[in-house]
Amino acid sequence: MSARIRAARENESGFTLIELLIVIVILGVLAGVVVFSVSGITSRGAKAACEANVQAVTVAGEAYYAQNNAYAATLAALVPTYLKTTPAGITYTANNAVTPKTLTVVGNPLCSTLS
């Protein structure tokens, strides 16, 4: 009986340490590729959200102008009627003293540096 067990153990095969290390290295490389791919997608999403905020504030400012024949003095004046909330990182500048009246809406500096 013990001879049979000994013979069975000699025929067992398994993974060597080198084979396991190679598999771990391959999995690490694949994980690194995925992490860098996902970070690129995230930064593109942040840039698109920033540009969408600038566009939303611009449209709200123009809608205010259409109803009042002047641009809103501050961004906060647009919130109750034209915007749900005040977007973060937006610079809103209205100049009603000149002809033609002007409106400038600029996103934060990160808007243009995101890629």
Image: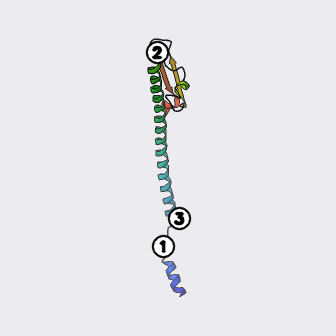
Asked whether 36 or 86 is in front, the reply is: 86
Q: Earlier in the sequence, mark 2 or mark 3?
A: 3
Q: Is residue 5 visible?
A: yes
Q: Amino acid at mark 3?
A: Leu
Compared to residue 29, the image places residue 97 above or below, namely above
Q: Earlier in the sequence, mark 1 or mark 2?
A: 1
Asked whether 52 or 2 is in front, the reply is: 52
Q: Secondary structure at mark 3?
A: helix
Q: Amino acid at mark 2?
A: Lys
Q: CA distance from mark 1 to mark 2?
A: 82 Å
**Classed neighbour count for the residue bearing mark 2: other residues with Cα under 10 Å, few (<14), some (14–19), many (≥20):** few
Q: Secondary structure at mark 1?
A: loop
Q: Amino acid at mark 1?
A: Ser
The residue at which mark 2 appears reads as 101
Asked whether 4 or 98 is in front, the reply is: 98
Front of the two marks 2 and 3:
2
**Classed neighbour count for the residue bearing mark 1: other residues with Cα under 10 Å, few (<14), some (14–19), many (≥20):** few
Residue 17 coordinates in the image, percent (x, y): 53, 64
**Classed neighbour count for the residue bearing mark 3: other residues with Cα under 10 Å, few (<14), some (14–19), many (≥20):** few
Give the residue drawn at x 44%, y 13%.
Answer: 100
Q: Secondary structure at mark 2?
A: loop
Q: Is residue 115 visible?
A: no
The answer to whether mark 1 and mark 2 are in CB contact below 8 A is: no
Residue 49 coordinates in the image, percent (x, y): 48, 35
Compared to residue 115, the image places residue 15 above or below, namely below
Q: CA distance from mark 2 to mark 3?
A: 74 Å
The residue at which mark 1 appears reads as 13
Front of the two marks 1 and 2:
2
Asked whether 10 or 91 is in front, the reply is: 91
The residue at which mark 3 appears reads as 17
